[in-house]
Image (cartoon, rainbow, N blue to C red):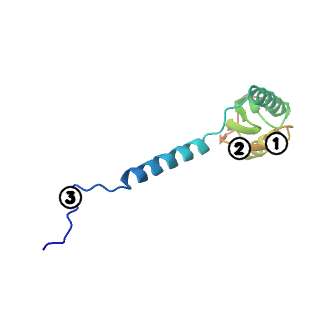
Amino acid sequence: MNHAKSYVGMRRPYGVLSTLVVVAGACVVAACSTPPRRTDAERSADAATAAHVEAALLADPSIYARHIEVAVDRGVVQLGGFVWSSTEYRLARRDAASVPGVTRVDTDMELMRGGVSGTGK
């Protein structure tokens, strides 16, 4: 008598279950990684904060702020564009952080060497 079992054509009962677990896990990760949509009040507050940050940058005589871009998302300020010196870089961060409602300042500014010619800075 041959008692060896043949596994050809047999299905694993947990193959479908493991696939469902993987798909469900991927959905959970995707849902957790996407921030909730901003409310109208949050968008309005962020726009006001961005305007105040821009005003603070333009009011600082030590910074040529016309090339600094400001974006705000839930109180987190993102500064982009470019500055002419490392001092302006630090001052721009400081000025942005000093605005009420700012919770954090992230920067993606580039440092342009050589300064500004003809700006009367």
- Horizontally, residue 2 falls left or right of residue 107, namely left
Mark 2, Cα crowd under 10 Å, few <14 / some 14-19 / many 20+, is some
Mark 3, Cα crowd under 10 Å, few <14 / some 14-19 / many 20+, is few
Q: Residue at x 61, y 40 (%)?
A: 34
Q: Earlier in the sequence, mark 1 or mark 2?
A: 1
* Disc 1: which residue: 97
* Disc 3: which residue: 8
Q: Which amino acid, by three-letter code, is at mark 1? A: Ala
Q: Nearer the viewer, mark 3 or mark 2?
A: 3
Place of residue 96 in the rendered image (x, y in percent of width and height, measured from the top left): 80, 39
Look at the image and tell me whether residue 107 can be seen.
yes
Place of residue 78 in the rendered image (x, y in percent of width and height, measured from the top left): 70, 38
* Disc 2: which residue: 106
Of residues 63 and 37, the one nearer the viewer is 37
The single residue placed furthest to the bottom in the displayed view is 1
- Tell me how far mark 1 sits from mark 2, CA to CA: 10 Å
Q: Classify the position of the N terminus by image quarter.
A: bottom left
Q: Which amino acid, by three-letter code, is at mark 3? A: Val
Q: Secondary structure at mark 2?
A: strand
Q: Residue at x 14, y 72 (%)?
A: 2
- Tell me how far mark 3 sits from mark 2, CA to CA: 59 Å
Place of residue 119 in the rendered image (x, y in percent of width and height, measured from the top left): 75, 28
Rendered image quadrant of residue 67: top right
Question: Mark 2 and mark 3 in contact (Cβ < 8 Å)?
Answer: no
Q: Secondary structure at mark 1?
A: helix
Q: Which amino acid, by three-letter code, is at mark 2? A: Asp
Question: Mark 2 and mark 1 in contact (Cβ < 8 Å)?
Answer: no
Place of residue 62 in the rendered image (x, y in percent of width and height, measured from the top left): 82, 38
Rendered image quadrant of residue 49: top right
Rendered image quadrant of residue 69: top right
